[in-house]
Amino acid sequence: MTAIVFGAYLAAIFAIGVVALRRTRTEGDYWIAGGKLGWLLGGATLAATHASAGTYIGTVGVIHTVGWEFTWLVLFIPFSYWFMAGVLGPRFARTRELTLPAFIERRYYSRRARALAAVVILIAATVYVQAQVIAGGLIAETVFGIPAVWGMVFFTVILLAYTAIGGMVAVVYTDLVQLVVMVIGALVAVPMVFRLLGGPGPLFAAVETLRPEAFEFGALPGVLLFTMGISFLLGGIATPEKLVRLYAMRGQQEIRRGLFLAMIVATGVNLLVFLIALGAMGLFPILPSGDLAMPLIASYALPPILGTVLLAAVVSAIMSTVDSLLLVAGSALSHDLLGVLRPGASPRARMLAARFGILIVGIAPLVLILSGVGEGELVQFIVLLFTAIMASAFFVPVVLGVLWRGLTREGALAAMVGGVTGVFVWQSGVLPWPGWGPELVHPAAPGVLVSLVLGVAVSRFTAPPPESALAPYFARPAGDSR
């Protein structure tokens, strides 16, 4: 029964992609849904993109492994959406682009900067999709009883098919469906988990008895927890799959309302997932991997129908994030890299390159996993590496770029290169200071710090930006007399 329901659900998602193809007539339609999204669709696709395997598999897995100290990171979610609504939204609404690298080129008057941004996105997207593919394999193994490897292949094929066919239009409408399924799944699971353990009081008592360390701090160093929070905050602000949705919405009012909706839904879903994680510790106190907790709750702790709903919510979270990343990766290859290397390429050539880019970024993570790269890593820690790369590459060029007129082309290039290099050097652990490294400080902190220092320092010693590059982001809107 579960397999039949899942098969029907995936078929429906694919059908949406086919229908979306008929509504996709231009590059603007394919990349940003024509810039015509209202606040409901825009907010829904933002919230659905936020809720990934990192939420439903990874967060539950980390909490099951290290305890409830990880839950405080949810406090960073409202701040990231508030910042996007108050600072980035008004400026992004003034000049519509199709991609984040296109913004980089306009603000920093440099095709090299645009190409560099596209390369960073391709690398980071590969890392992030890898986490989602691993989670997809776990779900397929649970639902269909097939090896996780074949489950990864199955999910990759479905995602590649409907994303490459329908573009942003397909992604937006499937995100809305998937968000509804995600919310219903979490709302259904929490009271059922409470009921199995006798209510909230007995649940907390069971966890304290079976996993007494769950409510203690110390499993992760305090500095590491704080810098993980910084990674979520800054990476959440600067990720291209979220920023491009600001371009997809009709105007500033829709952007603000959409971001408010996304903030409420994303925060609420995370709080529900925290309760599910607590239930997992009471029901399955010892597991070989924390990432198994959510699939086990759905398969063995809930009635079949409700378990299917929860698994569908997890699958929805995976799909709604991967399709967005695949779309961003496709645009980075076709609209940005190809646009720099072959500026005269026809729209048809760019669309073919886009679909090729989607295929490459979809298949590469699967190849890496099969080669043993990332094997055994908790899903959420892979997601955190992605946010570290994005924060270190784009927070300074995007945020400082619309707040400080003095950030130059050379400063932005130095910030991107230095930030990403700092993340990978710190993550590698090849440091001259004993006891320092990713086990104490998350790579996002040194990456963003290096990016900020280089961006400001290099800008101080290079020619200021031309007024034409600054005008779209610093000029007052028409009619503003302040």
Image (tube, rainbow, N blue to C red):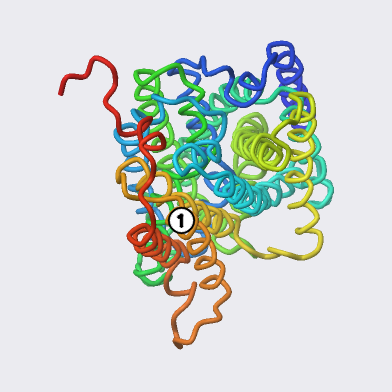
Q: Is residue 337 visible?
A: yes
Q: Which residue is mark 1?
A: 410
Q: Is residue 155 visible?
A: no
Q: Residue at x 32, y 60 (%)?
A: 460
Q: In terms of secondary structure, where does tag 1 sit?
A: helix
Amino acid type indicated by mark 1? Glu
54 above or below 29? below
* x and y percentages locating residue 305 in the rendered image: 65, 29
335 above or below 294? above
* x and y percentages locating residue 147 in the rendered image: 83, 51
39 above or below 392? above
Q: Residue at x 47, y 49 (%)?
A: 394
Compared across the picture, whether 145 is left or right of 54 comes to: right
- Pick the residue in front: 476 or 329: 476
Residue at far left of view: 482
* x and y percentages locating residue 339 in the rendered image: 67, 36
**Label 1 neighbourhood size at 10 Å, few (<14), some (14-19), many (20+)?**
many
